[in-house]
Amino acid sequence: MNSSAAPETAPGSTPRTAGVLVLAGTPIGDVSDAPPRLSVELAGADVIAAEDTRRLRRLTQALGVHTTGRVVSYFEGNESARTPELVEALAAGSRVLLVTDAGMPSVSDPGYRLVAAAVERDIKVTAVPGPSAVLTALALSGLPVDRFCFEGFLPRKAGERRARLAEVAGERRTLVYFEAPHRLDDTLAAMAEVFGAERRAAVCRELTKTYEEVRRGPLKELAAWAAEGVRGEITVVVEGAPEPGPADLDPAELVRRVRDREAAGESRKEAIAAVAADAGLPKREVFDAVVAAKREAASGAAPGTAPNA
């Protein structure tokens, strides 16, 4: 048993029971979406750790909740420094409620460090399920939702963003991203370039709010729309890569996929193996395509073109 699970007590005294960390989902727009348990936990928490204490105040006022616990800020800038303090409060028996500005803590929001530290001390962690921009956008997108992966925010720099997209260019599950409105047009343009201009997607804006909007269409059309300027909180849902067909398996396409993976940081050997696995081909066939393209490039032919028969 982890000896740090509970604080030491004097001989003959009653050991103190460790507290509970509660991750509480908060509304992503419409405050009436708040689950009833959220009000109960807000009223009963010993400590409330909030990403933005002002937004917490507005939330409690909207819910008609009176809090009696100590309120502390817990955001990206102080997350590392404040985590030990909250863990000690938990170890001393406090019920600590963690809330972020919207949605579930830890999902592209503060929370992971505190959860990991609590688990390390054998402290119970539970959750109040609430609204989720990821699941709401998926449901509204009109794209397959039986298998999906959440990619969070993309890097801000163009080269790093393109490399990250190249890593999942062949991913067949539906992809979900968060994005800032002022970067949306660049992101959609990069997606159209890497994933293909005709890949279907949905841009979900201001979910559950007054001006909620869902735009669906090929990436090239969505990129052109976003270039005119978009406001609000954005979730982007992108269709997964299609199953490879005969037209996808020509040598030029194989070479392009290998190069995309190399640009994302994979070694050539790793990239060839991954492309072969995705395409259902022997590694040797992909290797031969890469070698042939390299020879043609050296001899003056256009890089990535299919080798002569």
Image: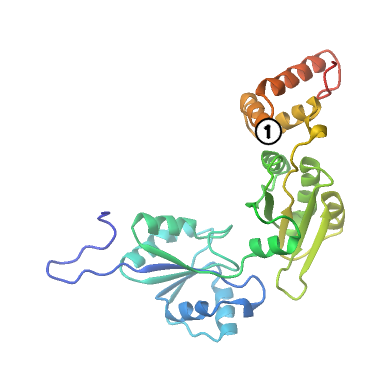
Which residue type does callout 1 highlight? Answer: Arg
> What is the residue that sits farthest to the top in this orientation?
299
Point out the image quarter for the N terminus: bottom left
> What coloring was used for the rendering?
rainbow
Q: Residue at x 73, y 68 (%)?
A: 206
- Can you give x and y, in whole percent of width and height, for residue 226 in the image? 83, 57
User: In the rendered view, does 103 fall on the left or right side of 290?
Assistant: left
Above or below for 285 versus 1: above
- Can you give x and y, in whole percent of width and height, for residue 265 in the image? 63, 33
User: In the rendered view, does 77 fall on the left or right side of 306?
Assistant: left
Q: Residue at x 81, y 45 (%)?
A: 192
Label 1 Cα crowd, 10 Å radius (few <14 / some 14-19 / many 20+): many
Above or below for 205 versus 69: above
Q: Residue at x 37, y 64 (%)?
A: 124
- Indicate the quadrant where residue 205 lies: bottom right
Q: Nearer the viewer, residue 147 or 234?
A: 147
- Indicate the quadrant where residue 121 lies: bottom left
